[in-house]
Amino acid sequence: MKLAQSIYIHFPFCRHRCNYCDFFKQVPTNNEKDFNSFEKLFLESFNQNQIFLTDNNYRLDQLKTVYIGGGTPSLWGKRGATLLKDLFDKNSINLQADCEFTLEVNPGSWTKDDLLAWRSSGVNRFSLGVQSLDSRFIKILDRVHNLDEALRTIEFFSNEDWNFSVDFMLGLPYSEEWNRDIYKELDVILSYRPKHLSLYILTVKDNYPHYEKLPSEDYIANEFLGVSKKLREAGYEHYEVSNFSLKDKESKHNLRYWESETVAALGPSATGFLSESKKRYKWKTKSAEFEVENLSLEEFKLEEVYMLLRTNRIISRSEVMIADELLQKWSELSYVVLHSKDEFQVLPDGFLMLDSMMDDIFRYR
């Protein structure tokens, strides 16, 4: 039986639903009642997940990574930390000694006691949903926290010397009109020297209330490349499209996705993947049921290529099965750097053009 050694857990509750967010989430009307209902569904889903894994010759154990996202899982507090630890213990699910166990935390939605409870349950990495350090953009993003809460959160984790990552956003509405100084914001974050940063380009649909005020594609591209340059000069490796880390501080959990490894999943709308079985499964939002997608070998290989191109690792041409002339084209466009005739590495300019690169691959197949 194969081991499933990573799991993503989705906690759906937030104090407030931000206007840009398209993850499944709920604002509780009664914490006790709503959390009880969620936990009942969560435990039912866990049992169904165990059956599904067993049926596919997997066993959840010897975990290398655990990631609790949302939503705002820091709101789950001590009860969540206790529930999950008891669940793992009861089912003999062990964490490896160097397991990376991440909890997402939003400013203004945590207490020190709750965080200590999570740490006692195994959490050793925190992802802070900061998004911006400019009050104007925090308001435009419809975040429930304010600038002081964001700064207090970063300062707390820095002072405690806990391993933390900061989530930040690029391409925000009004960035051009208001001359957003993202480098000044990043200077503040860098003064606390987080081990990891995730910088996402805001992606929304045309019904987004500030859609008409989004910056131009050229502005976003220049912002992305400028931020990449700044962080690399500050000692951070741009190891994936949206992710930067100090040496050996990459997100091990996210690397499991980008390396097309097996990641189990629990929680409403959460998506898991069984690599050897080539099965993706996604949980429904209101029942302990999930839908399964069986990938063909061709679909799996294409996804594997796409995931590889999202990273800065040195890739063998044979891994992506591309023609010499295509690789030369990418090199001339500064999408990649060639390390040899058969090895290349995607550059930040290439990260911006991933869809175009995949189109090239389709045309040359």
Image (tube, rainbow, N blue to C red):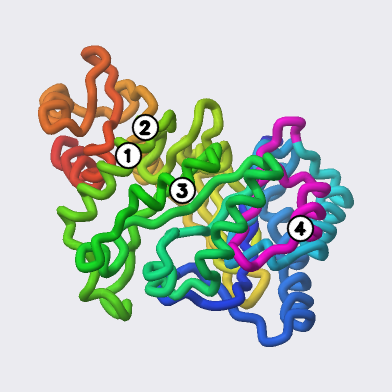
Q: Which residue is mark 4?
A: 112
* Residue at point 73%, 66% (across, down): 76
Pick whichever, 81 or 148, lies toward us: 148
Left/right placement of residue 5 relative to residue 23 reads right
Mark linked to residue 228? 1
Mark linked to residue 188? 3
The 10 Å Cα crowd at callout 2, few under 14, some 14 to 19, many 20 or more, is: some
User: What segment is highlighted magenta in the picture?
Assistant: 96-125
- What amino acid type should be assigned to the residue bearing mark 3? Val
The 10 Å Cα crowd at callout 1, few under 14, some 14 to 19, many 20 or more, is: many
- What amino acid type should be assigned to the residue bearing mark 4? Lys
Q: Secondary structure at mark 4?
A: helix
The 10 Å Cα crowd at callout 4, few under 14, some 14 to 19, many 20 or more, is: few
Quadrant location of the N terminus in the rendered image: top right
Label 2 and label 3: CA atoms lie apart by 16 Å
Question: Disc 4 or disc 1, which is closer to the eye?
Answer: 4
- Seen in the picture, residue 285 relative to 43 is either above or below; the reply is below
Q: Which residue is mark 2?
A: 232
Q: Secondary structure at mark 1?
A: helix
Quarter of the image for residue 338 reads top left
- Seen in the picture, residue 215 relative to 298 is either above or below; the reply is below
Residue 123 magenta-drawn?
Answer: yes
Q: Secondary structure at mark 2?
A: helix
Image coords of residue 116 (percent x, y): 79, 52
